[in-house]
Image (spheres, grey):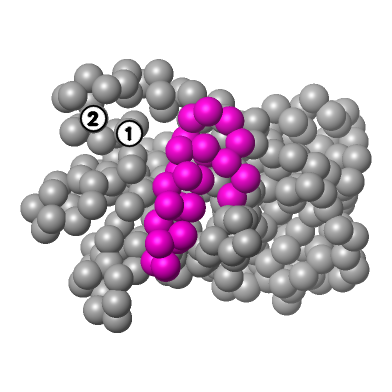
């Protein structure tokens, strides 16, 4: 457990089993994407006795990933972890979910390095060995867990692909419907400018910059179609990229490519994207 705290993991949800229902109550990071999460079994008051049971990484919002585990739909990871959570919580134990947002962003020669994704298997490797040495229950991870691979229980790569496919399918109308919110301000980004057509970043106008935080704070951007949230991004503010100090928001890596594809498929080169600001560090595109 100490390793998670050293890395900056924060408590973000609690798991309960009440009236034959598994309930995951989210406390923070609800809309954050591209984050690491860990299910921790709490035993007593001493944190050194808490057991890390499962480690995961999601590019979806934290809310939607937890919904998949809460419902337990499918035959792969959602159902397996759902049953594991039910088993632990029904025995009177407490389960807490810790998360690490993708706040650390590295670039090497202009190439984005996904720190969250890179840490996942390193943490699985660490806790697989740590739990065994300290006589803790083994991790429930299969993909990335060398113990399972060596025992030939499953083809690691095939299972990981199955888990990713299930994660993509786990959206439902109930989990991603958009509730109308007050619009504080709005602005347009003209795609006739090559910069905005060719690259996946957003500049916030000076007049609206007070609605955004300092560099390295996270901004949530939701894309809404037919009153459903089809995609959410967790973006990092950079206030040094523009000489005026106004915020620039980057959509890096795979998410950036998704945004570019979506933009090119749905907008004309001479068109513009309307961004609506619905809260501090919170924006939507309603297409």
Among all residues in the image, which is located at the extreme left?
Answer: 133
Instruction: State the residue in front, 251 or 97.
Output: 97
Q: Residue at x 63, y 62 (%)?
A: 19
Q: Main secondary structure of the magenta part?
A: helix
Q: Tell me if 226 is positioned left or right of 176 in this view.
A: right
Q: Quadrant of the N terminus?
A: bottom left
Instruction: State the residue in front, 36 or 208.
Output: 36
Q: Tell me if 187 is positioned left or right of 87 in this view.
A: right
Instruction: State the residue in front, 125 or 115.
Output: 125
Q: Could you classify mark 1 by the number of other residues whose Cα lies within 10 Å: few (under 14), some (14-19), or many (20 or more)?
A: some
Which of the numbered marks, if any, corresponds to residue 148? 2
Q: Is residue 285 above or below residue 182?
A: above
- The percent coordinates of residue 150 (x first, y second) are 16, 25
* Callouts 1 and 2 close, C-beta under 8 Å: yes
The answer to whether residue 104 is magenta is no
- The percent coordinates of residue 102 (x first, y second) are 47, 54
What range is drawn magenta here?
Answer: 70-94
Q: Is residue 262 above or below residue 155?
A: below
N-terminal-most mark, 1 or 2: 1
Q: CA distance from mark 1 to mark 2?
A: 6 Å
Q: Is residue 152 above or below residue 100?
A: above
Q: Quadrant of residue 109?
A: top left
Q: Which residue is mark 1?
A: 142
Q: Quadrant of the C terminus?
A: top right
Q: Residue at x 57, y 41 (%)?
A: 72
Q: Quadrant of residue 88?
A: bottom left
Q: Secondary structure at mark 2?
A: helix
The answer to whether residue 71 is magenta is yes
Q: Secondary structure at mark 1?
A: loop
- The percent coordinates of residue 13 (x first, y second) are 52, 65
């Amino acid at each position: 457990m100490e390793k998670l705290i050293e890395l900056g993991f924060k408590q973000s949800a609690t798991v309960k089993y009440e009236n034959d229902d598994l309930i995951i109550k989210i406390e923070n990071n609800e809309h954050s994407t591209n984050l690491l999460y860990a299910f921790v079994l709490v035993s007593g008051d001493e944190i050194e006795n808490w057991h890390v049971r499962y480690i995961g990484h999601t590019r979806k919002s934290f809310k939607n990933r937890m919904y998949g585990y809460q419902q337990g739909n499918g035959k792969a990871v959602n159902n397996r972890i759902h049953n594991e959570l039910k088993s632990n919580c029904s025995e009177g134990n407490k389960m807490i979910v810790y998360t690490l947002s993708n706040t650390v962003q590295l670039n090497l020669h202009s190439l984005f390095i996904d720190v969250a994704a890179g840490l996942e298997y390193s943490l699985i490797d660490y806790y697989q060995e740590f739990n065994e040495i300290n006589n803790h229950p083994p991790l429930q991870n299969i993909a990335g867990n060398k113990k399972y691979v060596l025992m030939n229980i499953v083809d690691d790569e095939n299972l990981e692909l199955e888990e990713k496919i299930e994660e993509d399918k786990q959206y439902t109308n109930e989990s991603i419907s958009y509730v109308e919110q007050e619009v504080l301000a709005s602005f347009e980004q003209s795609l006739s400018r090559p910069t905005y057509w060719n690259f996946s970043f957003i500049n916030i106008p000076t007049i609206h910059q007070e609605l955004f935080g300092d560099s390295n704070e996270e901004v949530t951007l939701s894309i809404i179609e037919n009153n459903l949230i089809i995609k959410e991004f967790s973006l990092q503010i950079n206030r040094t990229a523009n000489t005026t100090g106004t915020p620039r928001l980057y959509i890096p890596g795979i998410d950036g490519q998704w945004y570019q594809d979506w933009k090119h498929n749905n907008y004309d080169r001479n068109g513009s994207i309307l961004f609506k600001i619905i809260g501090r560090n919170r924006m939507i595109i309603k297409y």
